[in-house]
Image (cartoon, rainbow, N blue to C red):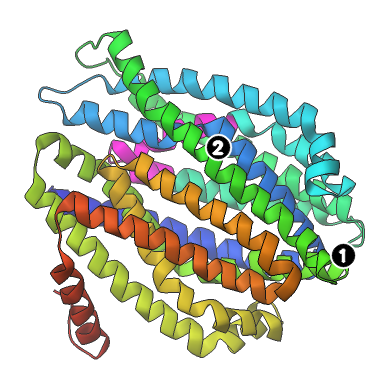
């Protein structure tokens, strides 16, 4: 099967799974918003922000490293040692996952009081810490599934994890008073822990048949381990900086809104509406491009190892054109139907209003997903991380200056400015690496216009 056909096949599998997950996730998010309210959702989003940073420490770049390393081994003439690469990645993940677990578990109290600024978050943080080793190990196996062309295994794992999460949260929340936000968040954390455990067990079960096969030709441990560390550690350090700044930005939002005169519950509620209601709707259709970008990484990596630049240019052109057309169509639909979506999903006119305001951000966000995937596939992950860190730095600065003066309007402005900054840097780098000139962008816009007006994209 040709490279582009493999990408199309696996993208279809991953997109189908992602669509199912996001449908379930959106229904779950709407139910959760009604069950615990916007302030409760805002508090949970702050807990999630801290947990994302802890998960970043647990993963420490290992998912992409596994995909890259296994793809390199499989792309070598005569085959390589994919099994040896996975084994080393699992050891790396175990170490970092355990360290992250201990740091979050014993640091939950100072983090909850000093960083989050809300004692009700402490119990949830401790519960979430237990799942960190499972998340890091699952990342290795899912990275292996993507690299080895078995995207369906990753899809099955993620769908099962999502279903367990929703069912467990529903079970744990059923008898808790919605006004008790500490217990509500703890119940959601228990559901997340159950889902991570189920996902890790299923991933290992699906990987067992592959990992028990005899390894390929031997590769010296030092060489393979050294390559792993050269990819993973720079990625990890960059991710710490980027996600740490992003977490700081999100933790500062309610505080700076309060400094601008908003009440504590109103600040949590406004933050919860944008991050916990509006963005899940905006991100819902992006599953196609996310799957496409992730599945393209091993194909672009293998082409780079072969020195097949014509294939790389063709693949990047097609990915960007599909991304542009798709993002413009989604933007139009969100803009036109935002009041209906806000009322139907969340029973909130305010959600519909913010959906319409933020809909022009969709092309930038979606194209950045595709661009970032292409850069990672071409070994430009450090550049991509530098751009993400710079975006987070700008975001923190804007939170400090815009929110006390302009409130939620300032939050919306910083979202636009940060996304535009990141995408412009990433896209410029991709054009330079692939040698595609400005004429390509002009042709892409022309074809997108033709397709949107009734033509066909070729």
Q: Which sits in the foreground, 364 or 164?
A: 364
Q: Separation of disc 1 and disc 2 at Cα?
A: 29 Å
Please give the label number shown on residue 450.
none
Q: Where, by quadrant of the figure, is residue 450 drawn?
A: bottom left
| Residue drawn at 58 percent across, 58 percent down | 395
Q: Nearer the viewer, residue 231 or 141?
A: 231
Q: Which residues are magenta?
A: 134-154
SS at mark 1? helix
Q: For this view, does 309 lie left or right of residue 46?
A: left
Q: Quadrant of the C terminus?
A: bottom left
Residue at (23% x, 78% y) in the render: 445
User: Where is 87 relative to 450, above or below?
Assistant: above
Q: Is residue 163 inside the magenta stretch?
A: no
Q: Is residue 37 left or right of residue 385?
A: right
Name the residue tied to disc 1.
Answer: 264
Q: How many marks?
A: 2
Instruction: Give the residue number, with chain letter if any, for mark 2.
Output: 240
């Amino acid at each position: 099967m040709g490279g582009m056909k493999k990408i199309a096949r696996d993208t279809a599998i991953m997109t189908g799974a992602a669509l199912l997950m996001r449908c379930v996730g959106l229904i779950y998010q709407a139910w959760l918003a009604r069950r615990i309210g916007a302030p409760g959702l805002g508090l949970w989003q702050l807990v999630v922000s801290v947990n994302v940073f802890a998960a970043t420490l647990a993963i420490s770049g290992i998912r992409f490293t596994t995909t890259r390393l296994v793809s390199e081994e499989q792309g070598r003439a005569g085959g390589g040692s994919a099994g040896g690469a996975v084994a080393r990645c699992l050891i790396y993940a175990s170490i970092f996952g355990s360290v992250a677990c201990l740091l979050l578990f014993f640091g939950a109290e100072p983090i909850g009081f000093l960083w989050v600024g809300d004692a009700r978050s402490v119990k949830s943080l401790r519960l979430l810490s237990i799942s960190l080793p499972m998340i890091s190990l699952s990342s290795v196996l899912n990275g292996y599934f993507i690299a080895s062309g078995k995207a369906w295994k990753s899809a099955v794992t993620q769908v099962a994890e999502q279903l367990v999460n929703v069912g467990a949260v529903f079970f744990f929340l059923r008898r808790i008073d919605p006004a008790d936000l500490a217990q509500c968040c703890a119940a959601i954390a228990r559901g997340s822990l159950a889902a991570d455990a189920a996902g890790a067990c299923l991933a290992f079960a699906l990987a067992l048949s592959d990992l028990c096969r005899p390894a390929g030709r031997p590769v010296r441990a030092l060489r393979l381990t050294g390559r792993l560390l050269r990819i993973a550690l720079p990625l990890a350090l960059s991710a710490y900086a980027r996600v740490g700044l992003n977490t700081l930005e999100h933790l500062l939002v309610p505080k700076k809104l309060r400094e601008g005169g908003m009440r504590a519950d109103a600040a949590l509620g406004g933050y919860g509406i944008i991050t916990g209601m509006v963005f899940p709707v905006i991100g819902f259709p992006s599953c196609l491009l996310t799957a496409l970008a992730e599945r393209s990484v091993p194909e672009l990596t293998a082409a780079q190892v072969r020195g097949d630049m014509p294939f790389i240019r063709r693949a990047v052109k097609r990915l960007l054109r599909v991304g542009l057309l798709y993002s413009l169509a989604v933007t139009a639909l969100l803009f036109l139907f935002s009041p209906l979506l806000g009322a139907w999903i969340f029973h909130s006119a305010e959600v519909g209003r913010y959906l319409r305001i933020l809909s022009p951000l969709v092309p930038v966000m979606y194209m950045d997903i595709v661009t970032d995937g292409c850069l990672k596939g071409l070994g430009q992950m450090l550049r991509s991380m530098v751009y993400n860190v710079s975006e987070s730095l700008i975001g923190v600065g804007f939170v400090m200056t815009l929110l006390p003066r302009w409130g939620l309007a300032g939050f919306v402005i910083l979202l636009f400015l940060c996304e535009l900054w990141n995408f412009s840097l990433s896209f410029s780098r991709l054009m330079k690496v692939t040698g595609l000139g400005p004429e390509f962008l002009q042709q892409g816009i022309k074809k997108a216009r033709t397709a949107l007006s009734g033509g066909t994209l070729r």
